[in-house]
């Protein structure tokens, strides 16, 4: 298992619910380390650029609208097999299908307002991290 970095975003619905601390606790208790954070409020255009890979999908416009509806907390997580571990902790995209105890099962309201985003591959993680962070923003704590 290689040490990886991945992007996690706590979405506007979860920020509004004030569950940031609980979500970060889950990452840390499961071996992921937060090495950078950025609280921001994306514009619709910024959300559109971030989710450009989904531009042809029917949910794209609603996703961009939702992601620009309030502040988000973007963070970089580091750890062994971080991409897969983050996705496991998040749970299924549809919270009704997410396993009990996952972030989405506990904090998401719907398939659209689903609390968190996580990179789906190492390649996408690198691109997504670069969208929010420069190398100077990231402080690895690995010894």
Image (spheres, rainbow, N blue to C red):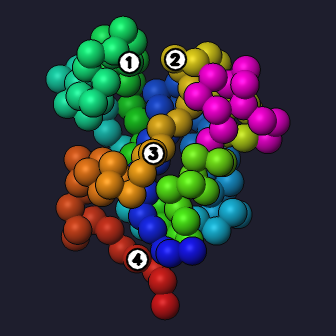
The residues tagged by marks 1 and 4 sit, at their Cα atoms, a distance apart of: 31 Å
Helix, strand or loop under label 1: helix
Choose the circle earlier in sequence order: 1 or 4: 1
In the depicted structure, whether residue 76 falls above or below residue 113: below
Which of 22/61 is in front?
Answer: 61
What residue is at 23 percent from the left and 47 percent from the top? 131
Q: Percent x, y for residue 70?
A: 39, 24
Of marks 4 and 2, the one in the foreground: 2
Mark 3: give few (<14), some (14-19) or many (20+) Cα within 10 Å.
some
Mark 1: give few (<14), some (14-19) or many (20+) Cα within 10 Å.
some
Q: Percent x, y for residue 35?
A: 42, 67
Query: Are the two marked residues, 3 and 1, in contact with CB atoms closer than 8 angstroms?
Result: no
Residue wearing tag 1:
63
Helix, strand or loop under label 2: loop
Range shown magenta: 90-101
Q: Which mark is residue 112?
A: 2
- Total number of numbered labels? 4
The residues tagged by marks 2 and 1 sit, at their Cα atoms, a distance apart of: 7 Å
Residue wearing tag 4:
140
Of marks 3 and 1, the one in the foreground: 3
Residue wearing tag 3:
120
Of marks 1 and 4, the one in the foreground: 1
The residues tagged by marks 4 and 2 sit, at their Cα atoms, a distance apart of: 32 Å
Query: Are the two marked residues, 1 and 4, in contact with CB atoms closer than 8 angstroms?
Result: no
């Amino acid at each position: 298992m290689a040490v990886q970095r991945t992007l996690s975003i706590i979405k506007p619905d979860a920020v509004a619910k004030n569950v940031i601390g609980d979500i970060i606790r889950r990452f840390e208790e499961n071996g992921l380390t937060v090495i950078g954070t950025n609280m921001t409020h994306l514009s619709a255009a910024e959300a559109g650029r971030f989710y450009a890979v989904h531009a042809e999908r029917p949910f794209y416009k609603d996703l961009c609208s939702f992601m620009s509806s309030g502040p988000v907390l973007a963070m970089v997580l580091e750890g062994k097999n971080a991409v897969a571990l983050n996705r496991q902790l998040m749970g299924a995209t549809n919270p009704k299908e997410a396993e009990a105890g996952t972030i989405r099962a506990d904090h998401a309201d719907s398939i659209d307002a689903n609390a968190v985003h996580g990179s789906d591959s190492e390649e996408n993680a690198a691109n997504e991290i670069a969208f929010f962070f420069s190398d100077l923003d990231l402080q690895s704590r690995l010894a």
